[in-house]
Image: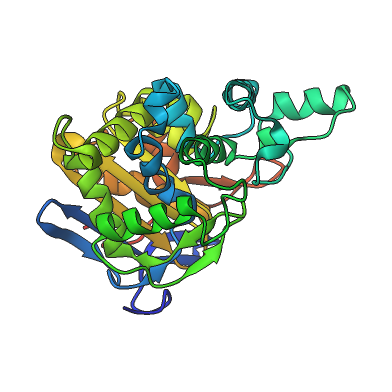
Amino acid sequence: MAKVNEGAVPVMEIWRGGLLECVHQAHAVICDAKGVVAAWGNPQAVIFPRSSAKMLQALPLIETGAADARGLSQAHLALSCASHRGAHVHVELAGRWIADLGLAESDLRCGAHEPGDKAERDRLIEAHEKPCQLHNNCSGKHSGFLTVTQHLKAGPEYVEIDHPLQKAIRAATEEVTGETVAGWGVDGCSAPNFAMTVEGLARAMAKYATAREGHGAREDAMFRLTRAMAAHPHLISGEGETCTELMRAMGGKVAIKGGAEAVYVAIVPEKGLGIALKVVDGGYRAAEASITALLAKVGALDPAHPAAVKRMAGVQRNWRGLETGFYRMADGFPA
């Protein structure tokens, strides 16, 4: 295992005035069922997957029987894996989910923040209302956490590291990544986030990509979560966002998920591939460009699609509309 800044390679360049102004470096790995297919940088770099691990954190929701016991829909499963924008559609679904459990918004442990969705943000301002925990981008994941907690009759403090839910998530994480967690930290939503290598994260995504329905509880859970995400791209992030736009561009055949500090993963079932990447400096523009380029490389995304073109290369303009430079993928990535 290696530190996150060891062995990274250039993935994206920013040019201004004919000079290279900025270079983003990253690690990226593509895996299939047998192992690493391609890699850039250091596959053994240890990272926090942040929200890109929500599909791992959602495994107990299905594996414990909690999802079926509560009659959760595919939309609920998608929201459990989401980092949504806090739009009305997200808040309403999470709110109804919590109410159906007989619980209240106060039972969530994710905290409140201003929604990223402009329409909902403006509505709150005009109504003189404060954002609540349902607006948190992780409220779907936490609704899933509460569903499992209630099903197991466990205690209400479900984000504590020694809670039965978090023990189950840790065990599932180690099983699908094929490695012992390298440590853990507290995420922005207060839940534990387990550290792993970029290769381990890609290996886990490959297992989701190759999961088949009717081949045991684990594969059933991975299969259902992947299909739920791909079928509901608007729930995973929101209008204008990378995850939503790229999944729509790929016709619901691929599930992708971003995480804070520039982590991205992709699950490509038709090709049996899992992809994971981490931009070292946390630059999200580079992470969005890099996952787009990797999806194009494996043939899952048309590089000429407008959603792909605008992320991989383009002109930079200032507030007056003057052209100031351009951005592009670095030479050799992804070769």
Residue at 42% of width from left, 47% of height from top?
57
Q: Is residue 146 visible?
A: yes
Residue 46 to residue 274: above or below: below
Residue 242 to residue 109: above or below: above
Give the residue furthest to the left. 34
Across and down, in percent, residue 274 comes to: 24, 48
Q: Quadrant of the C terminus?
A: bottom left
Front one among 105 and 22: 105
Residue at 56% of width from left, 54% of height from top?
191
Residue at 65% of width from left, 21% of height from top?
88
Residue at 32% of width from left, 39% of height from top?
63
Give the residue furthest to the front. 153
Across and down, in percent, residue 203 comes to: 23, 56
Q: Is residue 328 visible?
A: no
Across and down, in percent, residue 197 comes to: 33, 67
Residue 323 located left or right of residue 272: right
